[in-house]
Image: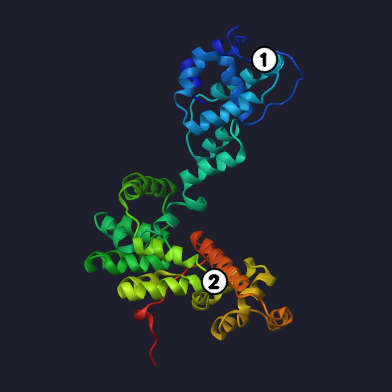
Amino acid sequence: MALVSQSASAEDLEKPASAGSQLQVGGEQRLLKGDEKAAALLLALGPDYGKPIFDELDELEIRQLSRAMARLGPITQEMLDDLMIEFVTTISSNGSLSGNTDSTERLLLSFLPQDRVDAIMEEIRGPAGRNMWEKLSNVQADVLAAYLKNEYPQTIAVVLSKIHTAHASQVLAVLPEELAMDVVQRMLGLDPVQKEILEKIEMTLRTEFMSTLNHTKRRDSHEQMAEIFNAFDRQTEARFITNLEEVNRDDAERIKQLMFTFEDLARLDMAAIQTLLARLDKRELALALKGANDSVKESFFKNMSGRAAKLLQDDMNDMGPVRLKDVDEAQTRMVGIAKDLAAKGEIVILKTNSDDQMVA
């Protein structure tokens, strides 16, 4: 809403709405909130001063403000005066302005509802509110390494120290060996990084790397198809995989490698399984494990207390026969929760492949 200050002076804002304004006067005194303030302010400005602001809004924002205007109802002169004073005071209370995520969120909350603000801030901060380092942990190791190899070794050391350790190891492995060893030495002697320097590195990554990546990155088709297959029930999944194997075995194998299935939960480390257990509904867990193989069941039982494991087994036995469809749905929900936890950086999911086979 700072755009208003460019279209009208403080004196203009403090004037009553002109006769041509659509603002209604009269009615009971009440507090305006969220988008009501923005709607009342734009109505008070009228078409001359309001048009430049509307020109800066997108279609959804215009629709939202229009709905707020339509349901605004009568606005008393005192309400209008209070709104203008609040607006002018807010704009002029500081000699300078500081733009950051907190101030942006506070401003948006002054004229937009919470759910709309949450959506906007999620876009700014990244998926699920993730910060830059968590987003970097989801960039392919070779892509991130290709960018970092042109940076100073000290900068690379800082970046790798901030991302997930498993991902940092993958990036180090594909960096030129001499550079990688230099980075290792610098990480070993890395002192706490000043906030200003860290923010500068984040800004550079956001503007020079992530923005370019978002515009040029083409999603791997096998990865996308693996997610689609993950959402199938087991009969549908088996049917599609079988048919695909007959047409193109390589594609089928690639998709199976990328899929994260319920059985893969057994390969999570102890801390990850315990984190997952803390987020699960116990009856849902019992239903999901009812159709699981012994390996998966054992992975969960051994990460529970003896008493909790016994209670869970009793719950499973008390269920009697259950529909396979219900088991599939429960298992799919568990996989979804695990993926959400991984996206938030609370657990790490690593798909196993032929290179991960253990030997005696």
Q: How is the image coloured?
A: rainbow
Determine the residue positioned at 32% across, 72% down.
247
Whole-percent x and y of residue 315? 72, 79
Viewer-side residue, 82 vs 29: 29
Q: Is 276 left or right of 181, judged from the image as shown? A: right
Q: Residue furthest right?
A: 28
Asked if one can make out residue 166 in the rendered structure from this viewpoint, the answer is yes
Q: Which mark is residue 272?
A: 2
Of labels 2 and 1, earlier in sequence is 1
Determine the residue positioned at 46% across, 31% down.
58
93 lies above or below 172: above
* Disc 1 secondary structure class: loop
Q: Is 165 left or right of 62, judged from the image as shown? A: left
Q: Residue furthest bottom?
A: 360
Whole-percent x and y of residue 322? 66, 77
Viewer-side residue, 58 vs 347: 58
Determine the residue positioned at 23% across, 69% down.
177
Determine the residue positioned at 51% across, 50% down.
129
Quadrant where the C terminus is found in the figure: bottom left
* Disc 2 secondary structure class: helix
Amino acid type, mark 2: Ala
Q: Could you say which quadrant of the image residue 118 lies in?
A: top right
Viewer-side residue, 6 vs 122: 122
Q: Label 1, on which residue? A: 24
Q: Could you say which quadrant of the image residue 115 lies in?
A: top right
Whole-percent x and y of residue 116? 56, 39
Q: Residue furthest top?
A: 19
Amino acid type, mark 1: Gln
Q: Is 256 left or right of 181, judged from the image as shown? A: right
228 lies above or below 127: below
Characterize the local packing of mark 1: few (<14), some (14-19) or many (20 or more) Cα atoms within 10 angstroms: some
232 lies above or below 31: below
